[in-house]
Image (cartoon, rainbow, N blue to C red):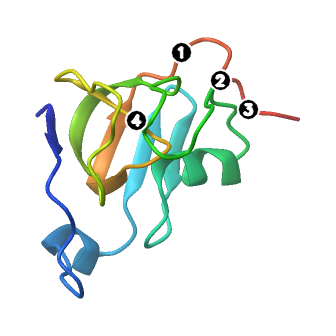
Amino acid sequence: MRECLLAPAQPGQRSEDEARGPALIHSRHGALAARPGETLLDTLERHGQRVEFQCRSGYCGACRTPLLAGRVHYPEPPLAFVPPGQCLPCCCHPQGNVSLDLAHGTEPSS
């Protein structure tokens, strides 16, 4: 499934996926556990992944990444264009487990 949700979050609303436990972010580097409220970029950085970004707010699009499976949610609609099948890790949150196609150069930092 390649769906991105652009609707603003409803205060206090939890998805079924959130009720099941932490989302897993799958990439060629393995599965990384996301913390509640954490953006995909926050999760990737916490696990030592280097991802190109500039703004952390969806303004520039520098972090645009292929979303292979799963869904993401944007608390605020990003200003950068997000084509179907892609996401902006800097400002989106996983809605359950997702799979990303991280580009070369996103090797784990030492």
Which residue in the structure is indicated by mark 4?
Answer: 88
**Few, some or many residues within 10 Å of mark 2 (<14, 14–19, 20+):** some
Identified at 37% across, 49% down, the residue is 92
Residue nearer the viewer, 22 or 89:
89
Is label 1 in a helix, a strand or a loop? loop
Identified at 30% across, 56% down, the residue is 76
Asked which quadrant contains residue 104, the reply is top right
Residue 94 shown left or right of residue 40 in the figure: left
Is label 2 in a helix, a strand or a loop? loop
Which residue in the structure is indicated by mark 1?
Answer: 103
Q: Position of residue 102 (x, y in %)?
A: 50, 23
Kind of residue sitting beneath label 2:
Thr
Q: CA distance from mark 3 to mark 4?
A: 19 Å
Residue 70 shown left or right of residue 63 in the figure: left
Residue nearer the viewer, 58 or 52:
58
- Looking at marks 1 and 4 on the same chain, the residue that comes earlier in the sequence is marked by 4
Which residue in the structure is indicated by mark 3?
Answer: 108
Q: Position of residue 11 (x, y in %)?
A: 23, 83
Identified at 68% across, 54% down, the residue is 46
101 is higher (above) or lower (below) than 74: above
**Few, some or many residues within 10 Å of mark 4 (<14, 14–19, 20+):** many
Kind of residue sitting beneath label 3:
Pro
Q: Position of residue 15 (x, y in %)?
A: 17, 73
Kind of residue sitting beneath label 1:
Ala
Which disc, if any, is residue 106? 2
Q: CA distance from mark 1 to mark 2?
A: 6 Å
